Image: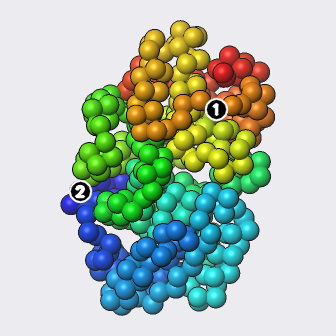
Amino acid sequence: MRNVHVELGSKSYDIVIDRGLLPHVGSRIKTLLPKVEKVAVITDSNVGPLYASLLQESLENAGFSVAMLTFTAGEASKNLQTLGTLYDGLATAGLTRSDALIALGGGVTGDMGGLAAATFLRGISFIQIPTSLLATVDSSVGGKVAVDLSGGKNLVGAFYQPKAVFIDPDLLKTLPVRYLHDGLAEVIKYGCIMDKELFVMLEKIQSDEELLNHVDEIIEICCNIKARIVEHDEFDTGERMLLNFGHTLGHAVEKTFHFDRYSHGEGVGIGMVLLTRQSEELGLTERGTADRIAALLQKFQLPIAVDMRRDDFLQAIALDKKKRGSHLTLILLKEIGDSFLQNVAFHELTRYLP
């Protein structure tokens, strides 16, 4: 078992990484939340058939009353309409402020379940059980919860820390290959911004089987990086913005194609490569960095380019959350493992776009 502690004073919590954890997680949650009587589990139509009954049995064996709420899988469901349906489900289940919500699934489930927990009855206890690589290494940690609007990703949200994150790496074995690689894009991001040794480790891995053999270590490394950053900057006003490397252009790619052609990780991978090529041209990044990122992404069948015009990027970026007034913060690399924040006036943004 591996454990990563996130120190946030009264909001501190642990990230537990343990193979075979899911069948026994009910007793751990009972120890953590002994006064909770009822839990609502939010999951999606892909994950629910695989793991919901196993989790429900574990929770009921620990003495909880359980309500299961399932929504249609996919980023297209991460909206206010689905959130409203979840609120109705929580109310129908009779949850009180002393009860809890568990998000069982990938990033969409964690983001939307977390926002439901943050706002239902003005806040109830919340636990993350991520089932995708992307969620285990990134979105389940740090307390960012949100839904999308037609204008862009994650425009309605909150900062709401979970009581715990329980990660069972065995659950990754049922991931479709595309979504295993999707999460790997976020792992590559961590290597790019802060951990050259992690990036080199990924360059040496030659197969998905080898990746899964090392995944416990990879998850722990990424969670440690994110935990330390979140401890310094919980509300994303400084250092935490480094975690958005590739996301400004990546979100633009997702939005332009209506969230149904490119997954989040695929968009981030494209964003990392395109932005780094431009920053190399501006003399801000060591030459060859973008090619190195591109080669690693391509090894795991991730895209590195997109059919978009500069105006498409500008239109999609106009509502980016990292925009402050007439300026936008971009995350750039000096080299692999060394990143920095670049404050750019919006009218100068074209210099950084392909």
Whole-percent x, y for residue 79 in the image:
70, 62
Residue 174: name its quadrant. bottom left
Whole-percent x, y for residue 201 in the image:
27, 34
Q: Is any part of residue 324 visible from this angle?
A: no
Position of the C terminus by quadrant:
top right
Residue 185 drawn above or below residue 146: above
Residue drawn at (42%, 27%) of the image: 295
Whole-percent x, y for residue 155 in the image:
69, 51
| Within-10-Å neighbours for mark 2: few <14, some 14–19, many 20+ | few
Earlier residue among tags 1 and 2: 2
Spatial CA distance of label 1 from label 2 is 38 Å
Whole-percent x, y for residue 51 in the image:
41, 74
Instruction: Say which element carries label 1.
Output: loop
| Within-10-Å neighbours for mark 1: few <14, some 14–19, many 20+ | few
Residue 74 drawn above or below residue 190: below
Instruction: Say which element carries label 2.
Output: strand
Amino acid type, residue under disc 1 in the picture: Val
Q: Is residue 259 left or right of residue 234?
A: right
Name the residue beneath numbered marker 2.
2
Residue drawn at (68%, 38%) of the image: 252
Residue drawn at (53%, 27%) of the image: 273
Name the residue beneath numbered marker 1.
306
Amino acid type, residue under disc 2 in the picture: Arg
